[in-house]
Image: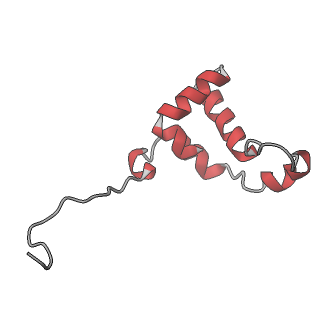
Amino acid sequence: MMGPRQEAQPALFYEFSLEDHVPQDHLLCSIDRFVDLRSIRAHLADFYSHTGRPSVDPELLIRMLLVGYCFGIRSERRLCEEVHLNLAYRWFL
């Protein structure tokens, strides 16, 4: 039969927002209100090479170090694993 389908179809895509899954009273939400690292790229631009592979974003690196410090994660490898798994850490970064 031609024409629009009369019965409801389930959505093919779903909407997911990290902000909806991180509680407002989380420690990283409090830190994010006071930490503004947007200008750090401009200050450090002269120290980054324009050749070769792209470097790690300095804002991302500092935010990862803050997460590690606040939550007692001493290993950089472990910190990368935790950031991969924890939604609040991903939201902060």
Quarter of the image with the N terminus is: bottom left
Q: Which residue occupies 35% across, 57% down? A: 15
Q: Which residue occupies 87% across, 47% down? A: 51
Q: Residue furthest bottom?
A: 3
Q: Residue furthest front?
A: 1
Q: Which residue occupies 91% across, 50% down? A: 46
* Residue 18 % position (x, y): 44, 49
In this rendering, position of residue 14 left or right of residue 48 = left
Is the residue 75 above or below the residue 25 in the image? above
Q: Which residue occupies 77% across, 56% down? A: 39
In this rendering, position of residue 42 left or right of residue 75 = right
Quarter of the image with the C terminus is: top right
* Residue 55 % position (x, y): 77, 43
Is the residue 51 above or below the residue 66 in the image? below
Q: Nearer the viewer, residue 49 or 1?
A: 1
**Residue 72 visible in the displayed image:** no
